Image (cartoon, grey):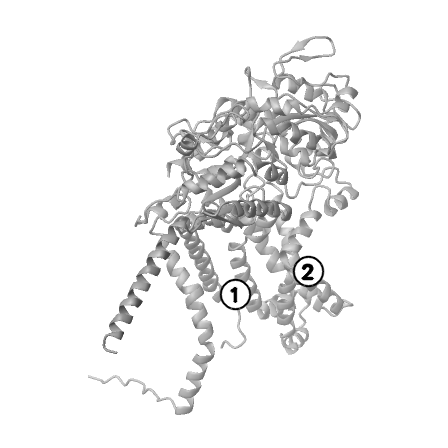
């Protein structure tokens, strides 16, 4: 019988222990904040999902088991809201990932003059408060707004009713979202600048053209940045809320086409005042976001390349 | 010294007891604290708050036994705040001004004023006929008449003249006279015929003529109150989605007729503008299409006088059309209510009587509302008339009160807010999507609401 030799735990030095203590001390305010304002409320909402808390109907507090989850399964409005969110995600995600990358490529390329000015111009809208931006876009996309006026000048006799037609409102929201691409552009630019020039030199020596350099150098080297952008965009889409709330008073107009899941969740909490069912919806949102994020992390092993990996 | 201390202690004890007793006696006489919660409807504007505070100060000065505190919460957060206060057992005593819909969101929370009206001998005779019914939910009298806003048909007399058509009747029961001398019942079918003739394209053709260009309409014949499907329905006949048992949803026949009329008017007959057209600069006059001056007729509450001057100097009001022989004027009604949880209902009723009584004129003026008390209505209309250069037949508005909708269109239904949300979604879809099968839509609407009620 062979004795298994356990690795010996190296005792921490006094200085290391002190440093650890100080480290914990420094992050203590965040830990307290996280426990008080995130972990505990999350735990509380989970407990709520098994109760019958409603401000609209005065009922004695009681344990309802899985009733709220059963109700969720049969709630057409919740699934319709999830459908609205998915539809928007299908249109929005490619745009929010690809466009900043392409813009960054353009701004970063040697052939483009005034790259600095372009960067400023493209980033500037991001500085404008989003609610103000949404209201500006509301006017731009109005029936007689600038965009439709421009379309009429181009010969489109009956331009879309961007914000009042269920078929056009999602593309309209995607257009509004372009307002906030500045941050993605900066992240992509930083990623592009960090790619070692030697890789391009080597590719050039090997006779690689623009497309092959993009395909075999830029995209693999940018994959961690693109992955980061995708993760953030997915979380953002699942939490999409502010624009439809501002533009349509949270009614889901036109015809329910903007009743996003997060908006339905908000309505359930604060308009219908159903705290327990609202908590159930919130947990569904959390689980879906977590599942999608985990799936993306799993898939990332196939296409995301980290330079530190061996 | 030995006897001094016990005596001193005894004296102190006696003093404490005496003080306690005195305080106790004084406690009985201490003023009762009441809290007046505003603003689930109007009331949050600076001059309105000032007027309300003046009423409170005046009342407090005259009543040593009651002290009222005005609690102003902005409209946007008033509903949620009140719900939270009630849920936490810290609700106010009096709430208002609040309309029927605002009150319905707190169904079951209001005090029944019936016993107080009886005990205090509160006189309901000075109010418009049926005004008190607007605040009666089942057998519970939730409010006293205060402010009412009947619906009338607003119309542009110049557009009728231009089309060579007689103006709609001002007196209820009168018939409409066509240019060929034919007389017709003043109902929605007649209104439809009129509206078609008053809907004009950019070439000057009306909707009854060959070659009418529906894609380029410059003037619409009719505009219903598009904000609320229940209002539209009630204009055809008062009813409720509740079949009567508080569990079963029914789409009342007059409401179904009204919604088909609305939908066909937009997408088939084209005398009502669609949602996208409603949003254009030409027709969206400060939130109401009639204010743009490009709509010939519109049904709306009396409160829309706030922006009607935008329609030009030739507007007037006419009687509401009938449907299936019945005339209805959906009437909005604001008042003050006492929460059932008030610890001092008797005193709260005393203050409530003051609000709808001696203080009412001051408050009604601040709110710009039509008094429910008939004796005060002439003075109100004299003031209102002074705001316009044209002569308006205000008698129509006074007469319309008799046709108020009972049950009220905004009355409580089970799952009130959820039901409203579903109705809002359908309203929006009908305004923005043509080619729908309305029978299928109504079936789906009923099923969707029923599912919510069944939870």
Element type where label 1 sits in the image: helix
Q: Nearer the viewer, residue A81 or A212?
A: A81
Q: Which chain is indicated by disc 1?
A: A
Q: Is residue B65 left or right of residue B436?
A: left
The label on residue A303 is 1
Label 1: how many Cα within 10 Å (few below 14, some 14–19, many 20+): few
Q: Position of residue A247 (x, y in %)?
A: 61, 47
Q: Contact, CB < 8 Å: mark 2 with mark 1?
A: no
Label 2 and label 1: CA atoms lie apart by 32 Å
* Residue drawn at point x = 49 percent, y = 43 percent: B95
Considering every residue shown, the one lying at the far left of the view is A1
Whether residue B279 appears in this view of the structure is yes
Q: Earlier in the sequence, mark 2 or mark 1?
A: 2
Q: Quadrant of residue A98?
A: bottom right
* Residue drawn at point x = 54 percent, y = 35 percent: B357
What residue does disc 2 label?
Answer: A125
């Amino acid at each position: 019988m062979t004795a298994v030799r356990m690795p010996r735990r190296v005792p921490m030095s006094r200085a290391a222990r002190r440093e650890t203590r100080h480290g914990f001390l420094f992050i203590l305010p965040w830990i307290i904040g996280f426990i008080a304002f995130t972990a505990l409320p999350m735990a509380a909402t989970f407990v709520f999902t098994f109760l019958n808390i409603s401000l609209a109907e005065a009922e004695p507090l009681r344990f309802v088991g899985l009733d709220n989850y059963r109700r969720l399964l049969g709630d057409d409005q919740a699934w319709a809201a999830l459908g609205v969110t998915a539809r928007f995600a299908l249109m929005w995600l490619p745009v929010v990932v690809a466009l900043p990358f392409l813009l960054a490529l353009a701004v970063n390329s040697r052939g483009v003059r005034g790259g600095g000015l372009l960067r400023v111009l493209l980033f500037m809208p991001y500085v404008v408060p989003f609610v103000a931006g949404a209201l500006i876009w509301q006017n731009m996309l109005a029936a007689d707004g600038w965009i439709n006026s421009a379309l009429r000048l181009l010969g489109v006799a009956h331009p879309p009713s961007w914000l009042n037609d269920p078929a056009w409102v999602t593309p309209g929201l995607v257009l509004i979202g372009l307002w906030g691409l500045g941050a993605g552009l900066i992240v992509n630019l930083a990623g592009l600048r960090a790619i070692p020039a030697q890789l391009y030199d080597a590719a050039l020596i090997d006779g690689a053209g623009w497309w092959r350099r993009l395909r075999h150098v830029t995209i693999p080297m940018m994959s961690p940045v693109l992955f980061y952008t995708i993760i953030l965009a997915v979380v953002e889409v699942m939490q999409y809320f502010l624009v439809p709330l501002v533009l349509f008073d949270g009614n889901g107009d036109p015809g329910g086409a903007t009743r996003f899941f997060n908006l339905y969740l908000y309505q359930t909490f604060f308009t219908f005042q159903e705290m327990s069912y609202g908590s159930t919806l919130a947990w569904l949102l959390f689980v879906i976001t977590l599942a999608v994020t985990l799936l993306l992390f799993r898939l990332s092993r196939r296409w995301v390349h980290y330079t530190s990996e061996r | 010294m030995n006897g001094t201390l016990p005596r001193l202690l005894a004296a102190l004890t006696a003093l404490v007891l005496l003080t306690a007793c005195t305080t106790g006696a004084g406690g009985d006489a201490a003023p009762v604290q009441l809290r007046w919660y505003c603003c689930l409807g109007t009331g949050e504007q600076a001059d309105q708050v000032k007027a309300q505070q003046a009423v409170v100060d005046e009342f407090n000065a005259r009543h040593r036994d009651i002290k009222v505190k005005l609690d102003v919460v902005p409209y946007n957060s008033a509903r949620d705040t009140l719900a939270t206060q009630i849920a936490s057992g810290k609700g106010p005593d009096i709430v208002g001004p609040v309309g029927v819909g605002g009150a319905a969101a707190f169904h079951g929370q209001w005090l029944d004023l019936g016993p107080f009206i009886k005990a205090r001998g509160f006189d309901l005779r000075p109010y418009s006929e049926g005004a008190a019914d607007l605040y009666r939910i089942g057998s519970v009298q939730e409010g006293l008449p205060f402010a009412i806003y009947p619906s009338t048909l607003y119309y542009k007399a110049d557009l009728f003249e231009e089309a060579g058509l007689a103006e709609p009747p001002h007196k209820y029961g009168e018939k409409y006279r066509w240019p060929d001398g034919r007389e017709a019942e003043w109902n929605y079918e007649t209104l439809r015929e009129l509206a078609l003739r008053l809907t004009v394209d950019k070439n000057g053709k009306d909707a009854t003529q060959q070659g009418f260009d529906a894609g380029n309409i410059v003037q619409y014949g009719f505009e219903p109150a598009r904000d609320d499907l229940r209002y539209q329905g009630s204009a055809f006949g008062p009813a409720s989605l509740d079949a009567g048992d508080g569990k079963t949803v029914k789409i009342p026949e007059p409401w179904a007729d009204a919604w088909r009329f609305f939908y066909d008017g937009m997408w088939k007959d084209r005398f009502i503008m669609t949602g996208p057209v409603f949003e254009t600069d030409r027709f969206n006059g400060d939130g109401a299409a009639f204010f743009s001056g490009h709509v010939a007729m519109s049904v709306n509450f009396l409160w829309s006088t706030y922006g009607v001057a935008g329609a030009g100097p030739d507007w007037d009001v006419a009687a509401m059309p009938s449907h299936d022989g019945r005339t209805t004027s959906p009437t909005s009604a604001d008042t003050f209510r006492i929460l059932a949880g008030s610890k001092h209902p008797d005193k709260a009723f005393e203050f409530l009587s003051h609000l709808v009584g001696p203080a009412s004129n001051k408050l009604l003026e601040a709110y710009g509302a039509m008094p429910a008390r008939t004796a005060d209505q002439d003075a109100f209309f004299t003031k209102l008339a002074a705001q316009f250069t044209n002569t308006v037949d205000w008698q129509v508005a006074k007469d319309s009160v008799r046709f108020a909708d009972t049950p009220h269109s905004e009355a409580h239904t089970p799952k009130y807010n959820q039901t409203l949300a579903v109705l809002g979604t359908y309203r929006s879809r009908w305004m923005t999507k043509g080619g729908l099968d309305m029978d299928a839509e109504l079936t789906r609407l009923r099923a969707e609401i029923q599912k919510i009620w069944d939870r």
